[in-house]
Amino acid sequence: WQWQWQWQWQWQWQWHIMESRRSTSTMMDRLAWWVLGLAPIQLDDWHGWSAPNKSSPEAMRGVWHVLDMKGNAVVTMDLNMLQRVDAGDTTSPKFYAIDTWRNYQSVLHSFEGIKLWLFAFLLQVRSDVNAETKLVRWSLLRGLLPLPFSSPTESTSDDDIMVRSIIFDWTGKRVARYTILRVVDAQGKRTEHYATMRRMIGPTAFLKPRSKL
């Protein structure tokens, strides 16, 4: 009888924990949708990435996953959505994106992901990319307030892996270094790194879709 009571108690406790987690997740999903328009997407089944952008260099095209940046809550960046800053500049073309554009950036399916998205939404974070050097800079209020940070990008022997640093421009000090993986390639096909992303962050991410799911 004692064994049966202990088994029943453990089963009830585990059920309670699962129900509590499910309730918290449901509440979080509703909050994200009502306040920010974020929806949970199942990465195994999601095929809503943008079509390859032939106006951008092939080395930049596709969907990229931020792999190992400390404290990071970004899951993917759809660089096919980058827009030309000056279409007439053919010597050193520059592109930009607003971090909260629909379908552009997905974040962790967690309150950390919601907080990051809320920050980007309230401050209207903009990313600018030099297509020739792959240097990334950020600004607030859609470009009105430049931030003193830049991110040089290093290529590797694998075209689907790049290494980025974040430099504090005033001192030249490197404050972060991390890897990005191309999970959807320049032709719109998943790469071997898609499985790595899926294994690292789980089955679900938050994304602001183009339309209701």
Image (tube, rainbow, N blue to C red):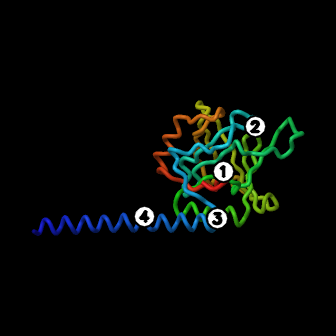
Q: Disc 4 versus disc 2: distance between alpha carbons?
A: 42 Å
Q: Which mark is residue 103?
A: 1
> What amino acid type should be assigned to the residue bearing mark 1?
Asn
- Disc 2 residue crowd, few under 14, some 14–19, many 20+, Cα 10 Å: some
> What amino acid type should be assigned to the residue bearing mark 2?
Ser
Foreground pick, 194 / 162 = 194
Please tell me whether mark 4 sits on a helix, a strand or a loop: helix
Please tell me whether mark 2 sits on a helix, a strand or a loop: loop
Q: Disc 2 versus disc 3: distance between alpha carbons?
A: 29 Å
Q: Position of residue 169 (x, y in %)?
A: 73, 54
> What amino acid type should be assigned to the residue bearing mark 4?
Arg
Q: Disc 3 versus disc 1: distance between alpha carbons?
A: 13 Å
Answer with mark 1 or mark 2, whichever residue precedes in sequence. Answer: 2
Q: Position of residue 190 (x, y in %)?
A: 56, 36
Q: Is the residue 75 above or below the residue 186 in the image? A: below
View extreme (front): residue: 212
- Position of residue 82 in the picture relative to residue 47 (left or right): right
One can see residue 200 in this view = yes
> What amino acid type should be assigned to the residue bearing mark 3?
Leu
Q: Which mark is residue 22?
A: 4
Q: Which is closer to the viewer, label 4 or label 2?
A: 4
Q: Is the residue 24 above or below the residue 125 in the image? A: below
